[in-house]
Image (cartoon, grey):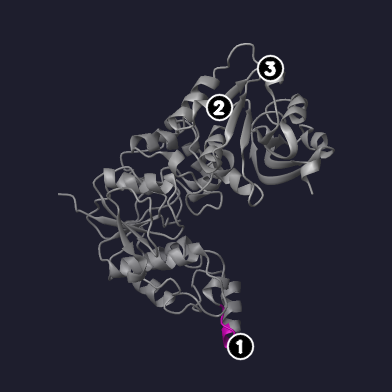
Amino acid sequence: MARAREVATLWTGGSLSWLEQLCLKSFVDRGQKVTLFSYADVANLPEGVIRRDAGEIAAADALAGGGVAVERELFRDYFRIQVLRHWSGTIWVDPDVYCHRPLDFDGDYVLGFAVPESDEVGLSVLGLPVQSPILADLTALMSDPHAIPPHLKPSRIAACEAAKAAGRPVHVGRQPAGAWGAKMITHLVGAHRLKGKVQPADTFYPVSLSRRRALLRAPGKVAAMLTDRTVAMPLWRANRQEIALWYGGLPPRGSCLEELAKLHGIRPEDAPVDHRGNGAGEPGLLGFLPEGKRVASLADLGGTAEALALAAHARDGCRIVLIDVDDRGEFAKTESSWVAPYRKALARAGVPAGQVSVIRDAAGLGPVDLLCNLAGFGDAHEVGGLEPFLTACLHPDSLMLMDLRKGSGGYPFLKALGRCETISSRKDARGTVSRVLFRPVSADR
């Protein structure tokens, strides 16, 4: 009979986004007991998840001292080990780990290689016997925030030892990133000859960090990476920033993540990923508007900013204008295929029909507070097609969110008209594209 195990994690980022909700709910739905530690109440915790006060495990300021700011990741590395010390038999999971099958391992060593054919041990899923030498070493190391981790480079160890001898010991917060992280665990697994206890990479990391974008694509790509050994997988924190900045805080339509959210009854539009990467809030792009800027009217040029439109309406109750044009900037003669699904999504989210309009001629255009031109003119299409819409849709205090591809001529085109502030950049098969906030000359005060 499989051993019933409990999993536990830590959350310090306020409300959960749909991504953390999805991961926690996946454990509940697989019949696994899951506890979320936090230092404050979490209002949008999925039903079935147990919340406990993180202060039972460690004080929030446990690593404070010496005027050193402790990063969130460093504190989580510390808290992870304290959970394993105090809660015998518990398996730690990071808050972005999705449960594919119950973690019902009989043995207390529950850890996996992060990459195939590599010695690197991952930390997203971790279980250790209370009496294990790894846990003993980590406990001793973490009892002194100025201790020198043995896995550091010899030159770094020598520098830390010299500083200690001079009476200026180096706090862990000033040591190399990940001082108590995966490199430390990997070192200790090797030092204690415990590699035989480590599961193959496809057990917990079937989608490696380098292949994480597969989760943003059609489900078939991820399905092909799963094996009979797979029980869990990180959805990767690195994907969160991309989701916030490029997908409005929601899973890409038709993606593996969208399918998983549907499977577990999670509504991403209720808790979109925040651009700061800490939890739920307004989808990332709204967070880059000037402080206090409210959006009374939003126009989506070409229908590529549905998530942003939904978020703007949820926050400000704005009027939404759908501008139905082709890739040359000419108005559609008949309704484009994207319009009906877009309107349906707005209606499903509670946007009144009277606040949505579809424009298919120049006479219907008018000034709006926010013009959205995502993956449109200046990226997928010639930037010149944007000009008539700038004239018709921007008033003195308008803003525009758009994508600009390097080499498109977009920056020179817009330079005389206002100022572009780069929010984020990424590379694809065609080169570099940047998401920018454009302020017209009259708004650039």
In the displayed structure, 377 sits above or below 127; it is: above
Identify the residue shown where x is 38% and y is 47%.
Answer: 21
- The amino acid pointed to by label 1 is Ala
Q: Residue 155: which numbered mark, if any? A: none
Q: Which residue is drawn at 60% across and 82% down?
A: 163
Decide if residue 200 is on the left or right side of residue 61: left
State the predominant SS element of the stretch in magenta.
loop
Q: Which marked residue is nearer to the observer: mark 1 or mark 3?
A: 3
* Residue located at (36% from left, 64% from top): 193
In this rendering, the answer to whether 112 lies above or below 351 is: below
Q: Say which amino acid is labelled 2.
A: Val
Q: In this view, does 272 lie to the left or right of 28?
A: right
The residue pinned by badge 2 equals 356
Residue 444 included in the magenta stretch of the image = no
Per the image, label 2 sits on a secondary structure element best described as: strand
Q: Which of marks 1 and 2 is in front?
A: 2
Return the residue found at the far top. Answer: 333
